[in-house]
Image (cartoon, helix red, strand yellow):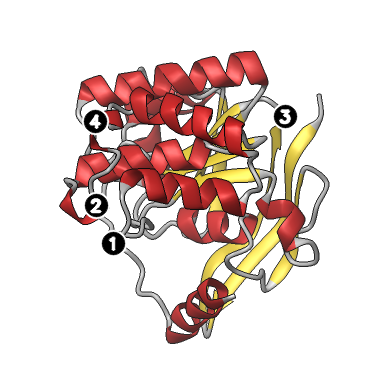
Amino acid sequence: MNQIIEVKNLTKKFDDFVAVNDVSFSVNEGEIFAFLGPNGAGKSTTIKMLTTLLHPTRGTVTLDGHDPVRQPDLVRRTFGIVFQDPSLDDELTAWENMEFHGVLYDVPDKLRWERILQLLKFVDLWDRRKSLVKEFSGGMKRRLEIARGLLHHPKIIFLDEPTLGLDPQTRNHMWAYLKELNKNEGTTVFFTTHYMEEADRIAQRIAIIDHGKIIASGTSAELKQQTATSSLEEAFLALTGETIREEAATSTDHLRTMRRVWRR
């Protein structure tokens, strides 16, 4: 099976803090892959390196055969992403946010309008397409971000806690659509979540990261067997402990890097 994501000895340091420490894993083309870990474990930092937003300190990454450091434009056309933090333009309407994204990705006019209509109806925002995003609730913004990430039919969709703040009906609707997209179009889904039942039900394979290192990987059943537990949540706690975690402090260098990326 072809590997659409390959990560080898990936490391990211911010001053003296090692956020990601010699991580290696791969994701198969057309796979639904969950990347789990406690707060501050290194999940979001890893995703930022995979998606060209951060350069690794050491190690290599390829997405669909392209290097995010040397070939960022090619890599960006490979994936869609729903960030953990809001990334919409609040001063634009829902339609304008979608339209702007489609133009950036050179989606032809007719196809772009068809996709916008389809996706806004899918996330139940068609009736609010002319409303400014700053008038939306948090859940509505999340749904719009998901629709936008899928607009250009990416080979890979990165979802960093995509269902945070969504009601169960919307979560189930979203995953049903993503599973259909995965099945019919072979879209690779890479997601993080703190909802263990979601990962258990959706993911074909799981990797768990803690303190910047991959500490376990396999199917949900394999992780339960490895830890002699009966649920993925119990397996997760057995591997990572029950101590409450806080988000790791972000260095000044990290913030400066992110600002430079978004000014490009």
Name the N-terminal-most of marks 3 and 4. 3
Q: What residue type is labelled 4?
A: Asp
Res 127 label? 4
Mark 3: secondary structure: loop
Q: How far separated are the C-alphas under marks 2 and 3?
A: 37 Å
Q: Nearer the viewer, residue 117 or 218?
A: 117
Q: Local crowd at mark 2 within 10 Å, few (<14), some, or many (≥20)?
A: some
Name the N-terminal-most of marks 2 and 3. 3
Name the N-terminal-most of marks 2 and 1. 1
Q: Which amino acid does label 1 sit on?
A: Glu
Name the quarter where the C terminus is drawn: bottom right
Question: Is residue 136 visible from the viewing direction of this image?
Answer: yes
Res 29 label? 3
Res 91 label? 1
Residue at (27%, 62%) from the top-left corner? 246
Q: Which amino acid does label 3 sit on?
A: Glu
Q: How far separated are the C-alphas under marks 4 and 2?
A: 12 Å
Q: Which amino acid does label 2 sit on?
A: Leu
Q: How far separated are the C-alphas under marks 2 and 1?
A: 6 Å
Q: How far separated are the C-alphas under marks 3 and 1?
A: 37 Å
Q: Quarter-wise, where is residue 49 in the image?
A: bottom right
According to the picture, the residue beneath numbered tag 2 turns out to be 132
Question: Is residue 194 visible from the viewing direction of this image?
Answer: no
